[in-house]
Image (cartoon, rainbow, N blue to C red):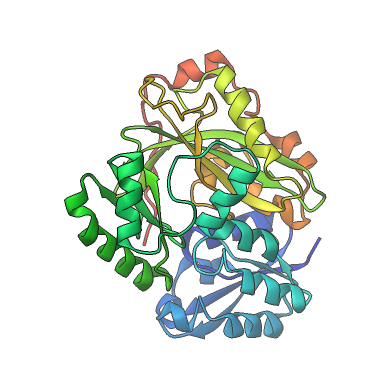
């Protein structure tokens, strides 16, 4: 257990962490840029430290400034939230070197799964079914066009360091390849500082299913059921449903444990993201468990869906404040029955909370 958590983030995720820490009698430290000095997370935290001007590169992405705030406030743990430094292995390593608890995966896990190409290679080695595509990064557009002919159009190219729908382009025919290749690389370079691109066969109208994975510091790993993220715009998820109205008990039994097995000794929060076509239209490489597409190793804005349904605060489970056993004791939704699925079939939205900012 620790006494004081510095939250290296802002907005909704910072407020969630503050609320959970209060319930656990843990002090909190907010960091903020000059543009965010009046933000709610600054007002609700026990302490607050300004770490720089509005530019995120000079504040929320500035590791030396955040570590200085840790030292000033005597915080003994750092919660990175999502975005910013949450998947930065160097930041996790610096915290480790300073004897500060990084509330998230180890630097080794982040390096292995934070890069999408490396993550896909790791899943293939583990025997996890994946979508056909390039073996590693594409060298140039010419290689991409040759591969697209082999696997067939449409294809999708993705930034290996991507997220939030950036650096992704769907290509329907060869004539459109070059312009999409150039724009995807430029966007990836501007957004992530890395223009590495890989390719996958584009699956039209799939179901996008994610299993929330949580692991504590003692090597215990579980999944918190699935959420359906199929309603999207510009590759960004708009609506999350839990449980998925398209899941059968048989498929859930196959996909859930399969996801957990891949995370042996994992510490933190992650999502196993997969695509499946419940209408039966996917080609011969589709398996009964769907095909994995990526494994984000961080907390997520979407994990609140499972927390809300299960009455949980999973975000601090793996940091030593709680164990998986504690989480399972609190969980209210671990057994999903036909009757609970039936309640979700009308697809009526019971409550819609739009975040501020």
Q: Nearer the viewer, residue 294 or 6?
A: 294
On the image, the x and y values in percent for residue 242 come to 50, 32
Numbered disc total: 0
The C terminus sits in image quarter: bottom left
Residue appearing at x 39%, y 68% in the figure: 195
Q: Quadrant of residue 189?
A: bottom left
Residue 12 lies, with reference to residue 305, above or below; the image says below
Residue appearing at x 82%, y 50% in the figure: 218
On the image, the x and y values in percent for residue 317 come to 71, 50
Q: Say left or right for 35 vs 141.
A: right
On the image, the x and y values in percent for residue 1 come to 81, 60
On the image, the x and y values in percent for residue 255 come to 59, 30
The reply to whether residue 22 is in sight is yes
The reply to whether residue 46 is in sight is no
Q: Quadrant of residue 100?
A: bottom right
Q: Nearer the viewer, residue 33 or 185?
A: 185
Residue appearing at x 68%, y 38% in the figure: 260
Q: Say left or right for 278 vs 105.
A: left
């Amino acid at each position: 257990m620790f006494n004081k958590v510095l939250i290296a983030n802002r907005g909704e995720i910072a407020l969630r962490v503050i609320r959970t820490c209060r319930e656990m009698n843990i002090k909190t430290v907010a960091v903020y840029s000059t543009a965010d000095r009046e933000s709610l997370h600054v007002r609700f935290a026990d302490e607050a430290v300004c770490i720089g001007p509005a530019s995120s590169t000079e504040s929320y992405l500035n590791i030396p400034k955040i570590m200085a705030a840790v030292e000033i406030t005597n915080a003994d743990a750092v919660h990175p939230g999502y975005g910013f430094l949450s998947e930065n292995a160097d930041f996790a390593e610096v915290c480790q070197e300073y004897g500060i608890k990084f509330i998230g995966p180890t630097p080794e896990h982040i390096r292995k799964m934070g890069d999408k190409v490396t993550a896909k290679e790791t899943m293939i080695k583990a025997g996890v079914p994946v979508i056909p595509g390039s073996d590693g990064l594409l060298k140039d557009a010419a290689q991409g066009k040759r591969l697209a002919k082999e696997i067939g159009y449409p294809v999708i190219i993705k930034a290996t360091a991507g997220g939030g729908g950036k650096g992704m382009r769907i290509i329907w025919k060869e004539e459109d390849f070059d312009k999409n290749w150039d724009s995807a690389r430029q966007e990836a370079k501007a957004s992530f500082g890395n223009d590495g691109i890989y390719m996958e066969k584009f699956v039209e109208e799939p179901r996008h299913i994610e299993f929330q994975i949580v692991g504590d510091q003692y090597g215990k790993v579980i999944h918190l059921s699935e959420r359906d993220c199929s309603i999207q715009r510009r590759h960004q998820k708009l609506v999350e449903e839990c449980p998925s109205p398209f899941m059968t008990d048989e498929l859930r039994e196959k996909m859930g444990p399969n996801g957990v097995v891949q995370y042996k000794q994992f510490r933190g929060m992650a999502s196993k993201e997969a695509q499946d076509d419940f209408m039966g239209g996917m080609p011969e490489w589709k398996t009964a468990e769907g095909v994995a597409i990526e494994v984000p190793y961080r907390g997520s804005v979407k994990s609140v869906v499972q927390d809300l349904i299960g009455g949980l605060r999973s975000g601090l489970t793996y940091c030593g404040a709680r164990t998986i056993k504690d989480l399972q004791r609190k969980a209210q939704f671990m057994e999903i029955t036909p009757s609970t699925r039936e309640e979700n079939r009308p697809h009526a939205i019971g409550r819609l909370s739009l975040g501020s900012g």
